[in-house]
Amino acid sequence: MTAHTTVPAQHDGGATILEIGQQPGVWREVGTRSDEKAAVFLADVLDRPDLRVVLTGAGSSAFIGDIVAPALRRHLHRRVEAIATTSIVAAPLDHLERETPTLLVSFGRSGNSPESLATTALADSLVEQVWHLILTCDQTGALARAHTGRDDSLVVPMPERTNDVGFAMTSSLTSMLLSALVLLGPAGADDIDALAGAAEHVLGCQPDIRALARAKKQRIVYLGSGALEGLARESALKLLELTAGEVVTYFDSPLGFRHGPKSVLDADTQVVVYVSTDPYTRRYDLDIIAELRGQLGAEAVTVLSTEPVPAELGPAMVIPGLAGRTDAVVAAAYLVFAQYLALFTSLEYGKTPDNPFPSGELGRVVQGVTIYPMTEGER
């Protein structure tokens, strides 16, 4: 099923729905690429036992790091940390370690965000040994241009069509996420092919997702553990962005949610729980499903899982072909659901998903940020 026929063109969501729907094909393209230069560069850098890997970006690009860091940490047996460029630029000495060899992995749809360039420049200035892996959807962007041709940098462009025209990051985000897992982590061609098939299944679920959006709940809460907490954060941002802030969104882990944030729940709240593939972690996810459905009712809690949940917990959207795969991989398929829910909710509220801020309050690339140079006394 294609994604083109669900939303009338007059709603100004054509670019966004195209970019969501193209993801299975994009992922297959990412999974079948072979880059000998990249393999040699990364093998040399990753051979250092004291290497620190920092995953960075702003907004949705930062959340890629939150999603993939746990899988990369297990796979590489190295320090792997997700730190937003916005945090690094504001307080570089809190996050950059001068004497620790560092691979800085930068995610950027356009690579034109001011914090992206500033972060790599700060790393060059403050870290004695630093290498850069640039994952971007725009080969002509400022970040790609700044690092192309450098011996200490590797620029890996995504397929050209992932440079999303729509306001929200959709295929751009998932292509960079999967590229990181392929280049640095555990994802192989079979994972990517399974993911593409799973995403095609979600494409076929558009009527169900549209029905969920028609409820027009005023509050949407996303819950996930580990890598899926990063996914919950991105899901919450996607819906907040595309409804121009009209729907209140929140994210947390199932365990963390009970410690105060659960007070956000009311009769006008929809909860989405992303169920982990890890058998141990999954127990906590199932507990929160039982608890919240007992409190709010089954229909108020949407469950996404790669395998059926116990019958007594009620229904779940089961995405086939992914059982047993790492949560960082599964997150890409779950994210297609979140993107569609954000898109359809935006339309239900009369917004224009391709540009939910037509007056210019927010743009596709952040503007108006002043980057301050560090003086010698501040280093």
Image (cartoon, rainbow, N blue to C red):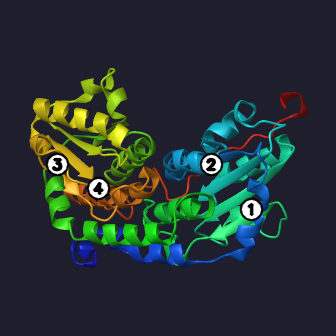
Task: State how far apart marks 2 and 1 are (Cα).
Answer: 17 Å
Query: Of 318 and 150, which appears nearest the observer?
Result: 318
* Label at residue 373: none
Q: Tell us which disc is closer to us: 2 or 3.
A: 2
The residue under the point 79% across, 49% down is 48
Query: Looking at the figure, which quarter contains the C terminus?
Result: top right
Give the x, y percent position of residue 298. Answer: 10, 41
Q: Earlier in the sequence, mark 1 or mark 4?
A: 1
Residue that numbered label 1 is attached to: 43
Task: State how far apart marks 3 and 4 are (Cα).
Answer: 26 Å
Q: Tell us which disc is closer to us: 4 or 2.
A: 4
> Under tag 2, what secondary structure?
strand
Residue that numbered label 3 is attached to: 216
> Under tag 4, what secondary structure?
loop
Quarter holding residue 100: top right
> Under tag 1, what secondary structure?
helix
Q: Is residue 90 positioned above or below 36 on the image?
A: above
- The answer to whether residue 319 is visible is yes
* Label at residue 306: 4
Query: Looking at the figure, which quarter contains the N terminus?
Result: bottom left
Q: Earlier in the sequence, mark 2 or mark 1?
A: 1
The residue under the point 28% across, 79% down is 2
